[in-house]
Structure formats: C-alpha cells, structure tokens
Amino acid sequence: MGKYFQPEIECASQEQIRAWQDERLVKQVRHVYDNVEMYRKRMDEKGVRPEDIKGRDDLHKLPFTTKDDLREQYPYGLLAKPLSECVRIQSTSGTTGRRVVAFYTQHDIDLWDECCARAIVAVGGTKEDVVHVSYGYGLFTGGPGLNGGSHKVGSLTLPMSSGNTDRQIQFMTDLGSTIICCTPSYAAYLAESIIERGLQDKISLKAGIFGAEAWTEEMRHDIEEKLGIKAYDIYGLTEISGPGVSFECEAQSGMHVNEDHFIAEIINPVTGEVLPDGEKGELVFTSITKEAFPLLRYRTRDICILSHEKCPCGRTHVKMTKPLGRSDDMLIVKGVNVFPSQIETVLLNKGYPANYQIIVTRVNNSDNLEVQVEMTPEMFSDSISAISQKEKELVSALKAMLGIFADVKLVAPKTIARSEGKAVRVIDKRNLYQG
C-alpha cells in the first residue's frame, strides 16, 4: 500500500465515488444553467432541463464544450460566479488567436492545491522533502499548481520557475532538492547539464513529476537513468484547473483521475458517442466541484484509454493512459497519421537524445517530412561518411515505424532550441488550414 494525502477519498469505494459524482453533477448542472448564458442556451436548444440530470448516467445528454467556445466567450462569458468572488486567473500559452482564461475562487484554488498534493504524496513526498518547482510561474498553471500542492503537503518549496539552469543546479545542490517538477524536455536538459558539470553525486533527487507535454516510456527511462530518480507523469489542463487532474502512482502504469472533482469520459472523436472502458478515444472532462469556471463535457482533444482495473497502489480512482496522441495536432503526412511520439520512440531506441524537430513542407502538392536530430557529442566527432551512414539507418527505422519516408538531418549538439515551457517539436509549413 502506498502513501496517500487524503486516503478516505483516494481509496474510496466505487459506490462512494459514484455517489459523490452523481450528487455533485446534479448540483453543478443547476449552477451552470442558472449562471452561464452559453450553457443555458445550449441546453435549451437540446431540450435538456437541469432536473433531467439525475446523475452520471445522464451526462451524455449534456452539450460538449470546446476550446473554440472558450475563445469565443473570452473573457467573462463562461464565468459562473461574480467577479468579486474570484481571486485569480490562469491562462494557457495560446498558440492561436485569443488566449483561454480560466477563473478561480479561493475554494477552487484550495481544491486544486489538494489535487496537486495528492500527486506529490503519490511519488513519495512528505513534509521532509524539498520540492523544486521548475515549471513556469505566472499565467502558466504548472508553477502555481505544484507550488500550492507542495505547501499543502508541508514540503519546503523552491519556487524556481523555468530557465537559468546554473541557478537551478546551484539550489538543487545547496538546498538538497529531492523532488523536481518540470516539463520532461527540461528535465532531460537539466540531466545533460548536471552530467556535463560532473555534479551527479551532489544531487539528492529521488523523484520527478513531469507533465505539460507528451513524452514516451523511452524518454522516461532515459531521464530516470541520468538523474537517478523515478519519473512520474502528471496531467491537467488550464481549462479544467491545471496539473493534478490526474497523476501517476508508484505503479507508473497510467494516471489516476481525481474523480471526486472531475468526471472523465472517452468518446469517439468523430461521432461524439461515449465509448466503454478500454476503448481508445478522445478524453472529455466535466468539472463537478469548480465554482468560478465549471466546464461541462470539455473536449480535451487528447486520445487515451480509461481503465478501472485494480491498482496495486490501493487507489480506486479510474486510470487514464498518458495521451496517445491528439485528435487535432496529429500530423497527417501523405495521408498517414504521424505522431511526434512515434518519431521520439525511434530516436531514443537508437541512442539519440530527445532533442529533435519535425518539419513538414509541401512542394508541388507533395508532402515532405524532415526530421532534424541532434547528435550526441561522441557522434559529432565522427567522420562525414559515418554520419551519413547514421542518417540512412534512421531513415529506414522511421520508415518501419511510420510507413512513410522521412528525410533525416543530423545536426550538431545543442543546435535545436531548448524549451523551458513546451518543446516546439513540429513545424508545419504547409498552411493546410488557410481558406
């Protein structure tokens, strides 16, 4: 049995979880219908009244919410509480057009902190730990979420934010950081930097909580080996609260969804129908305890699988796999679905660092896929012919994985821009979405 932050909730019976969800959903639907015009209109259009929702089984009657809705309702359209009761906003790193802004009451923040505290305790965190938070602070939810969770656990919290790697490593060694929280790509970069400086034996880290971008099992093992830690996944979205919607336990086999706060569904991304456990589809969340910014059936665009199989850690909340791709930013190249994670798997299996960029262009109506990959310093010292041989090997390995040809260019170490937020893995120059 593992350690829990709130055992009576994290190990509650299925009946109890179900009872919480039914009761909270009924209350939430009434709250949203009474206070958010968009939901009232949508429900009226569908002929659904709040009293038609008696519990989880009626969830499918409710309308979906999408990121476009959030952009269209910016800034205050989805607010369900008076602004005077809100104490904070967080916002996504919007890549297109209007940003998405989420509002929080103090109660919302307290619950979010508890969710993040569960994640920290699940990786072995206690009040004796030094939690080193290298997610971005400010509008990005990563820093504030894990900062709040760490305070709730009672750990010494280092609010490092991202960047300034020298300072990160100095505090890590001087203050004996034991748990690091950051993006997986930044963890890999920190590991490289620690090894370069020969400081591995000065580091006291035992665990890492990594999220905010997709990463593979190969990358997990790579980080674990280089930093001498266990690496755990955490999942969340600003729209639903931030990190801590779900988190990995010691089993490292999927993330437990905090079902007392969020109802998870898997749908067919094309038809919207709800799929049974074990089927792969798009993840949809309903917030059942959020006051200021409660979303009903929010489509995450993340593709994953839910499982109610018994977990050795003793937690009873449903588990989701790490996202297996996106129903939107998946690349379709020459008609073939390509996920960056497939390319990353090949590179790590072949001993390359997880620093790469995928560039897609279209010439004469034909798609061209180029993968730029950083070499390790040892490879960089090879002769030109040895390097071109390595490129050929990667071309055939990628062809085997993806089913299509990718042009591979090996580039000098440290030439691909490092990310301290989310790594920019894909540059699509095809302008597919214009007009």
Image: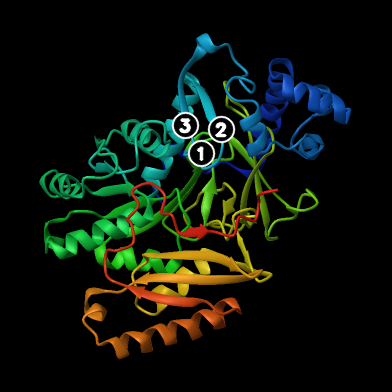
- The circle on residue 94 is 1
What residue is shown with label 2?
98
- Foreground of the two, 40 or 61: 40
> What residue is shown at x 49% (from left), y 58% (from top)?
427
> What residue is shown at x 39% (from left), y 64% (from top)?
220
Residue 270: image location, x then y, percent: 77, 53
> What residue is shown at x 38% (from left), y 71% (from top)?
373
Q: CA distance from mark 1 to mark 3?
A: 21 Å
Which residue ends up furthest to the right in the rendered image? 47
How many residues crowd mark 2 within 10 Å: few (<14), some (14–19), many (20+)? some
Q: Are marks 2 and 1 in contact (CB under 8 Å)?
A: yes
What residue is shown with label 3?
112
Q: Amino acid at mark 2?
A: Arg
User: Dot 2: what SS?
Assistant: loop
User: Dot 1: what SS?
Assistant: loop
> Visible in this render: residue 251?
yes
> Visible in this render: residue 295?
no
How many residues crowd mark 1 within 10 Å: few (<14), some (14–19), many (20+)? few
